[in-house]
Amino acid sequence: MENIKKLTSKRLFMPLFCLAVMLIAAVIASPDFFKIGIQNGVLYGRIIDVINRGSEVVILAVGMTLVVSASAGTDISVGAVMAVVAAVACAFTAGGQQSVNEYIRNPLLGALLAILVGILCGCFNGFLVAKLKIQPMVATLILFTAGRGIAQLLTNGQITYVRVDSYKMLGSSIPGVPVPTSIFVTVLMVVLTMLLLKKTAMGMYIEAVGINSKAARLVGLKSTMIIFLVYAFSGFCASIAGLINSSRIYSADANNIGLNLELDAILAVALGGNSLAGGKFSLLGSVIGAYTIQTLTTTLYAGSVSSDQIPVYKAIVVVIIVSLQSPELGKLMRRLKAKFSAGAGKGAVS
């Protein structure tokens, strides 16, 4: 009993438990869920689809975790930033034309330029939140509202196609490598971020600022700079996610790239057991939460649920999962258990 209590008290127990439940539900809905094959030289299967398609949410959740921890707020602009980044990359690579069938400009330079733009978007949000002290949701609402309009201006209101094979590799695979490229990029982003947080004092600084920014400032931490940096990093994560998403569809679709992914990223942070009030965080928990959301989405599609109905089912499941992780629900369950034990004891005595 003591071992079970220790196990359930672990921070990652509930996120892992929820992911396990989702995987079991996925197997029930689709018995061949874990079946893996090779199609066109690349690994193929529903579980591969979860890991591959979940890449954007995982990368966004990495940046969102740090934003939530340091500023006790969320960056709701990341989906729109993805659209801006995709528009910049495709507009540059396509040379301003709407349909290109041959190599015109270097897609690598286009990608680097797009990443720079994404970081600048993050810096803009960071300036508003850290320096001007604007509430995070209000500050990021600016780009959330204007971002897709900017992307439309960059693409002249049309879907910009890029017919360059190398541009497609990020969202598909490298010739001769059976694993989708986005999986490698996601692993690299998560590992590098975890190393940065664990091998340097940055992780401790972010948590300290999130717990009490005034106290952190009194002990010599530059709270304003730390909050600014986490928003810049969130912009960087949105840039990578935007390039992956654009590469998948070989184009820049300002209306659909990154649409509602900011909500999935926030949910991933919450499902990972992180408090949206800031402070201590678990990056690995957010990654698990992101894959839980993607597993749910893939399972619903496997169950022939229409795309219009999926948000309703996701909302129901997310409410249940978040409620299970609620400290207040835990206290209530312990009180009920205590009352039940006390009642059972009185009955035995009488």
Image (spheres, helix red, strand yellow):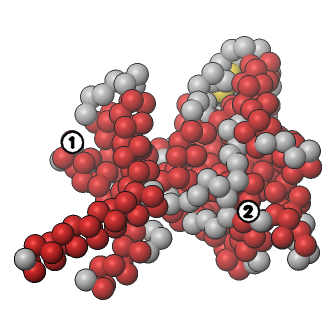
Residue 75 falls in image quadrant: top right
Quadrant containing the N terminus in the rendered view = bottom left
Evaluate if marks 1 and 2 touch, with contact meaning CB atoms under 8 Å apart: no
* Residue at disc 1, secondary structure: helix
| Circle nearer the viewer, 1 or 2 | 2
Considering every residue shown, the one lying at the far front of the view is: 350
Q: Which amino acid does label 1 sit on?
A: Ala
Q: In this view, does 153 lie above or below 261?
A: above
Quadrant containing the C terminus in the rendered view = bottom left
- Nearer to me, 335 or 4: 335
* Residue at disc 2, secondary structure: helix
Residue at the disc numbered 1? 29
Count numbered badges in the picture.
2
Which residue: 10% across, 73% down?
347
Q: Which amino acid does label 2 sit on?
A: Gly
- Nearer to me, 210 or 226: 210
Residue at the disc numbered 2? 210
Which residue: 77% across, 77% down?
201
Q: In this view, does 203 lie to the left or right of 348?
A: right
Residue 116 falls in image quadrant: top right
Q: Is residue 33 left or right of residue 270?
A: left
